[in-house]
Image (spheres, rainbow, N blue to C red):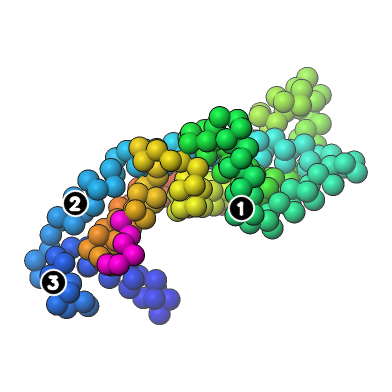
Amino acid sequence: MLVIAFVTPFLFAVSTSLRTAQDVAAHVLALPTRPTLANFSRVASDIHYPRSVLNTVIITGGTCVVVVVLGAMAGYALGLTTRGWSRWTYRAFITGMGVPLFVFLTPLYLLLRDLNLLGTTFGVILVYSAWNLPVAVFFYTSFVRTIPGELGEAAAIDGAGRLRTFFAVYFPLLRPVTATLLIFITIAVWNDLMVPLIFLQDPDQRTVMVNAYSLLDSRVVRPTDLFPAALLGMAPLLVMFAFFQRRMVEGMSGGALKG
């Protein structure tokens, strides 16, 4: 029953996308008698699909790199430090997880404007990175605390410094939490509409979801435009997860063999 509940809306979107507008107006819930891809080609042209997907991939990939590197290094330091300042720093990051992003939209807008980063892809990456960094610090700090300290001591005896110990010993052990975090960040950034809509004014820089949103009309609802746009928007995400599914599962299940 759960599978049917989740799959039915998707099948309805696919069915509607393959029908003409006249056919949908006549029979909303009918199956396509003469399937056509004209809706997909028209929508792909309207939302500048290749460019929109490229923009989304750049923003999502840049955010993942920044959050993983900074989050892992912060979690490594906070997880191995038992001083009072580290506990308060960790709590500050945890507090950031409970603050919604829209609370900071106006200060962030003014800050990016003063830094001349408003309307730039790099500025959007910074916003997303700051938004997801508390979650990354929480994940990595909790995971680092479960790693035996003898591993770091053995690396120190071999002459490795803190930075080399992190990249050679701890970071490879963080693959399970990294895989989980990448899934979380990718879905959150790819499907987000608010940040690129506000911080990117140039239509050539906007993401696929923002351009799909531009097809909405306050007076007329066109399901033969909206459903193909939604399917095209999430298609690269589905392909990516299907392609990297094995590696993600291996990374997440690798935590069971960590010890």
Q: Amino acid at mark 2?
A: Arg
| Real-space Cα separation, disc 1 to disc 3, in angstroms | 42 Å
Q: Which residue is mark 3?
A: 23
| Marked residue nearer the N-terminal end (2 or 3) | 3
Q: Nearer the viewer, residue 33 or 226?
A: 226
Image position, residue 137 (x, y; %) = 69, 45
Instruction: Report whether 50 appears left or right of 131.
Output: left
Q: Identify the disc placed on residue 42.
A: 2
Helix, strand or loop status at disc 1: helix
Q: Quadrant of the N terminus?
A: bottom left
Q: Is residue 68 above or below residue 235?
A: above
Helix, strand or loop status at disc 2: helix
Q: Residue at x 35, y 37 (%)?
A: 204
Q: Residue at x 33, y 73 (%)?
A: 8
Q: How many marks?
A: 3
Q: Is residue 32 above or below residue 60?
A: below
| Real-space Cα separation, disc 2 to disc 3, in angstroms | 17 Å
| Marked residue nearer the N-terminal end (1 or 2) | 2
The range drawn in magenta is: 215-220
Marks 2 and 3 close (CB-CB < 8 Å)? no
Q: Which residue is mark 1?
A: 101
Residue 136 in magenta?
Answer: no
Q: Nearer the viewer, residue 184 or 226?
A: 226
Q: Nearer the viewer, residue 113 or 23?
A: 113
Q: Is residue 93 above or below residue 9?
A: above
